[in-house]
Image (cartoon, helix red, strand yellow):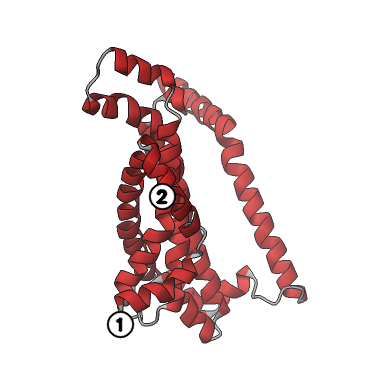
């Protein structure tokens, strides 16, 4: 009897969970399957000059990359896991530096009108330069692929963080400033109790935009920079060898990592930013 009640409760729990989350899981899966089906049909009838999903999986070299992502034969001959990890490590370094500099400079610009007026035209000018345009400059100045790649990531990712942080600081309600002035709150207490909490939603908006841009920048930079381990260089190598299936598989890795990075920043934002500010 007790076992029957327990099974019934378990079934009810699963049913409630499915009813609550069915659309969150089922609809994306249906959409993905529909996309893959249409892609395969268009490829099969010749309207799309790319291999279909089944053709990609059936191809020997692509299947080996899919099944053995951890192989390492030395040099740049590595599995997709190691290629992606190398790109991720570069992004982590460049993005971390961009976050520190961007938040720091954003606070300075947001709290100092003179600095804002002096630097805003320069910032607006530099932020419009595409990541690929920085690659030859970085290579000419730094003479090495690795630091050049980190610079391209940094210079691409820093602007959304900087500008959004500055806007967040400028948007602090005047009432907060007046209260701080009346209560004679110290600068340190004002910084940590009023300025940072008020600007957090804007800071995280910049961080989420920048992580996507940083990931895009490293892929573009690695395609141009030769002889380095990374998913971008892997794509260019596969393209020059006319292995379109490997290129498409690498794109799947890129999209999956980009999605995870965005969700990770969003999760951190959910943990840190107060509920009333979301």
Label 1 vs 2, first from the N-terminus = 1
* Quarter assignment of residue 48: bottom right
Q: Where is residue 4 shown, x and y percent of the image? A: 46, 23
Secondary structure category for the residue under label 2? helix
Residue 269 or residue 186, whichever sits in front: 186
In the picture as drawn, the residue positioned furthest to the bottom comes out as: 241
* Quarter assignment of residue 154: bottom left
Mark 1, mark 2: which one is toward the viewer? 2
Residue 168 or residue 87, whichever sits in front: 168
In this view, 237 is above or below 189: below
Crowd class of label 2 (few under 14; some 14 to 19; many from 20; radius 10 Å): few
Q: Is residue 157 in view?
A: yes
The residue sitting at 45% across, 42% down in the picture is 164
Residue 97 lies left or right of residue 52; in this view the side is left
Q: Where is residue 179 shown, x and y percent of the image? A: 34, 14
Residue 51 or residue 278, whichever sits in front: 278
Residue at which label 1 appears:
75
Residue at which label 2 appears:
119
Residue 115 or residue 239, whichever sits in front: 115
In this view, 256 is above or below 61: above
Residue 90 lies left or right of residue 133; in this view the side is left
In the picture as drawn, the residue positioned furthest to the top comes out as: 182
In this view, 224 is above or below 108: below
Q: Where is residue 273 shown, x and y percent of the image? A: 39, 30
Residue 54 lies left or right of residue 254; in this view the side is right
All told, the count of numbered labels is 2
Q: Where is residue 18 shown, x and y percent of the image? A: 56, 33
């Amino acid at each position: 009897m007790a076992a029957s009640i327990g099974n019934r409760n378990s079934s009810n729990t699963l049913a409630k969970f499915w009813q609550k989350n069915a659309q969150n899981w089922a609809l994306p899966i249906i959409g993905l399957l529909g996309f893959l089906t249409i892609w395969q049909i268009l490829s099969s009838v010749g309207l799309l000059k790319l291999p279909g999903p089944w053709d990609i999986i059936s191809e020997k070299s692509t299947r080996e990359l899919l099944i053995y992502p951890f192989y390492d034969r030395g040099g740049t001959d590595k599995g997709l896991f190691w290629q992606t990890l190398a790109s991720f490590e570069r992004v982590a370094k460049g993005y971390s530096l961009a976050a520190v500099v961007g938040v720091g400079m954003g606070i300075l610009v947001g709290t100092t009108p003179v600095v804002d007026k002096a630097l805003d035209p320069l910032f607006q000018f530099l932020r419009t330069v595409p990541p690929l345009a920085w690659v030859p400059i970085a290579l000419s100045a730094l003479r090495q692929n690795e630091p050049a790649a980190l610079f391209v990531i940094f210079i691409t990712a820093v602007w959304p963080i900087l500008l959004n942080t500055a806007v967040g600081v400028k948007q602090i309600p005047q009432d907060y400033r007046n209260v701080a002035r009346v209560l004679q709150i110290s600068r340190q207490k004002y910084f940590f109790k009023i300025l940072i909490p008020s600007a957090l939603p804007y800071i995280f908006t910049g961080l989420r935009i920048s992580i996507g841009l940083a990931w895009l920048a490293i892929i573009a930079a690695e395609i141009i920079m030769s002889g380095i381990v990374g998913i971008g260089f892997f794509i260019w190598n596969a393209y020059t060898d006319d292995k379109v299936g490997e290129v498409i598989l690498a794109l799947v890795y890129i999209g999956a990592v980009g999605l995870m990075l965005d969700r990770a920043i969003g999760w951190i934002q959910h943990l840190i930013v107060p509920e009333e500010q979301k």
